[in-house]
Image: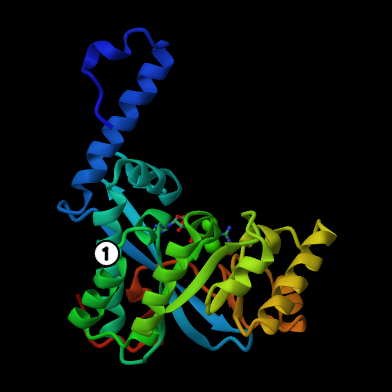
Amino acid sequence: AKTGGRGMFRAFEPEMDKRLRERRALERDLSAAISRNELQLSYQPQALASGEITGFEALLRWHNPERGQVSPAVFIPVAEESGLINPIGEWVLRQACREAASWARPLQIAVNLSPIQFHDDHLPVLVAQVLQETGLAPERLELEVTESVLFDDLARTTSTLQRLKALGVKVAMDDFGTGYSSLSYLQAFPFDKIKIDKSFISQLDENVNSAAIIRAVIGLGAGLSMDVIAEGVETADQLVFLRKEGCHSLQGYLIGRPQPIEAYADQVGRFEKR
Ligand code: C2E
Ligand code: CA
Ligand code: CA
Ligand code: CA
């Protein structure tokens, strides 16, 4: 949003003024990040409970010469509020698809979508374009959206999901259990996969409710014919529990950290350096 010039902030507390200026500086740096080649993707493996790698999630990294490494938890919200998420998200989608298309093994590539991208009517057309341009088989692309997309216009959400599904891509519900969506919504939308939020996995040791919730989500996925993946798997104990409960897939530091794709060259059968 535009402001009415410098004078406008004079009435604010100096602290507020400072934060606003920092925010704008961050926005300005972020808007130049693509053209300055400061964005990069990290890739984190996703595996079956047996350990077999089935694909990777692309995670955005921003390295700015002055700021150093900035966390997506910091800059994604800024990108969303400033509208920069559209060009940045498009860059991520294109880059991830291009990368995956260069692998010898036809593994899955999961790409995160902001709710703002999801609600852009142009999204299915963009996805179709990128698939065509990169030659990636549609079924290898999985788009991760959070529960929050279900709260907006339900008819529109359903139509977007159907348009995406019609392209042959997969859709996963990310961070499941952290929002407030009712279970009946899940039935109404054609998700292929549910990702159990990492907060439930990390609390497995301390909180008995976590185990109950994880069990329930695994059962829900089985009942609705949706794959279930647990994220944030860090310990062998967590792995043992998830296997025992019949969790389909796993992701987390125990399987592999998010890293530049070069670190996983053997797994993907990468024959081309970019
Ligand atoms: P997310 O989609 O839920 O991604 C999972 C986050 O958990 C990632 O943080 C990942 O590095 C981290 N993680 C993976 N395994 C473990 C583990 O075993 N333990 C712990 N403690 N953490 C683990 P990251 O990369 O910092 O990303 C944070 C969030 O930023 C993502 O959460 C996602 O919401 C957003 N994000 C990242 N890349 C993109 C992107 O390209 N587009 C959009 N719209 N959002 C993105
Ligand atoms: Ca994700
Ligand atoms: Ca997640
Ligand atoms: Ca998250």
Q: How many numbered marks, from 0 up?
A: 1
Q: How crowded is the residue under tag 1: few (<14 C-alpha within 10 Å), some, or many (20+)?
A: few
Chosen colour scheme: rainbow
The N terminus sits in image quarter: top left
Q: Quadrant of residue 103?
A: bottom left
Residue 273 appears in the picture as rendered: yes
Residue 65 appears in the picture as rendered: no
- Determine the residue positioned at 34% across, 89% down: 269
Q: Residue 109 at what x, y percent from top left?
A: 39, 78
The C terminus sits in image quarter: bottom left
Q: Residue 106 at what x, y percent from top left?
A: 37, 91
- Residue highlighted by disc 1: 122
Q: Is residue 53 rendered to the left or right of residue 66?
A: right
- Determine the residue positioned at 36% across, 47% down: 80
Residue nearer the viewer, 105 or 229: 229
- Determine the residue positioned at 50% across, 61% down: 154
Q: Is residue 188 rendered to the left or right of residue 271?
A: right
